[in-house]
Image (cartoon, rainbow, N blue to C red):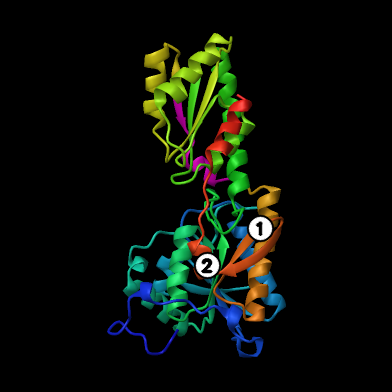
Amino acid sequence: MTEEYSLSNLPDLKSLTAINYDSVPEKDRPKISTIGVLTSGGDAPGMNASIRAVVRAASHFGIKVFGITRGFHGLWKGEFDEIGTRQVSETLQRGGTFLMTARSKTFETPEGVLKGAQMCKVFGVEALVVIGGDGSYKGARDLARIGVPVIGLPGTIDNDIACTEYTIGYDTAMNTAMEAIDKLRDTASSHERCSVIEVMGRRAGYIALNVGIANGAEVVLIPEQPFNIERDVVRTILDCRNMGKRHYIVIVAEGAGDATEIAAKIEESTGIESRPTILGHLQRGGRPTLRDRLMASLMGIHAIECIQKGMLNRLVVYHKGSISDVDIEKGLRMKKTISLEELNRSKYLA
């Protein structure tokens, strides 16, 4: 952490910029011997695999690792514990995160960020690996802006981090949702019923869109695209009934609408028995799939390779078939969304 910063003279974090090590000659980049690793925000299957990869790769290069429990909340409270290869054995296949995670209101303030930076100094931590989503990345950026080097790993089931095409936990969450919807389709078919299934995705509809295609849903509703319930839902269900269908699946991302209200509207307008199902945190749990274990492991290794090279304040990304990294300030400025064209493709298969 930069020495001159204290609670009395901490500037507005928005006025600061993290060091971009792209422009720093290799000989002048910091040599890191001790790091911390934490998981933040919502848990995602594969987080344990990424922690394991970070610890094992760090051990290979002789880098000491502190595990920080409860995310940024544990960071500013000083919940640091040195971990090695023995502590991460038998974690690869486990869901959740053994370091635990928590939301921290304190860390959302400049004072909380400074407390976190000061704790890094107390434990001799020279860089942090932060595994989490967009909110976690913003916390990491705030630390980087006051002199704590960071590496971000994308751990979120929503796949809503703009700078990467894939996030740890996304594949497992989709498979969990797909399997649950397959079971609901069986009972919907038996009762000539409409099932309205709410999946996770407060600001992003990637899970809804992809499981909608994989499960042959008649309707998919996502937050990126507004919809008219009469035209896009009720009319579609009626058209399907008139073509001879006797059961229907509607997938709604949690940020697009309320499954209970939509189901009630369908039943009121069509007379078709409609039942809402909210999958909720079921999608966060379970053993990570092969893809999530592989991606988490390779991303964790890449994080340590960045640290070993002195390429800090980076976000590890998956782009065009390979794992790489981008500057944290640049990565957080990027945007991505689901187009109407992508959504309309799901209707071809209904």
Instruction: Using the image as rendered, state which of residue 64 and residue 315 is in the foreground.
Output: 315
Q: Quadrant of residue 248?
A: top right
Tell me the residue that label 2 is attached to: 330
Q: CA distance from mark 1 to mark 2?
A: 15 Å
Quarter of the N terminus within the rendering: bottom left
Residue 281 within the segment the image draws in magenta: yes
Q: Secondary structure at mark 2?
A: helix
Q: Quadrant of residue 116?
A: bottom left
Q: Is residue 175 above or below residue 239?
A: below
- Label 2 Cα crowd, 10 Å radius (few <14 / some 14-19 / many 20+): few
Could you tell me if residue 137 is visible in this image? yes
Task: Give the x, y percent position of residue 143.
Answer: 44, 74
Q: Which residues are magenta?
A: 275-286
Identity of the residue drawn at 49% across and 14% down: 238
Q: Quadrant of residue 122?
A: bottom left
Could you tell me if residue 87 is visible in this image? no
Identity of the residue drawn at 51% across and 53% down: 43
Residue 243 within the segment the image draws in magenta: no
Q: Is residue 215 above or below residue 47?
A: above
Task: Give the x, y percent position of residue 215.
Answer: 61, 29
Mark 1 vs 2, N-terminal side: 1
Please give the label number shown on residue 319.
1
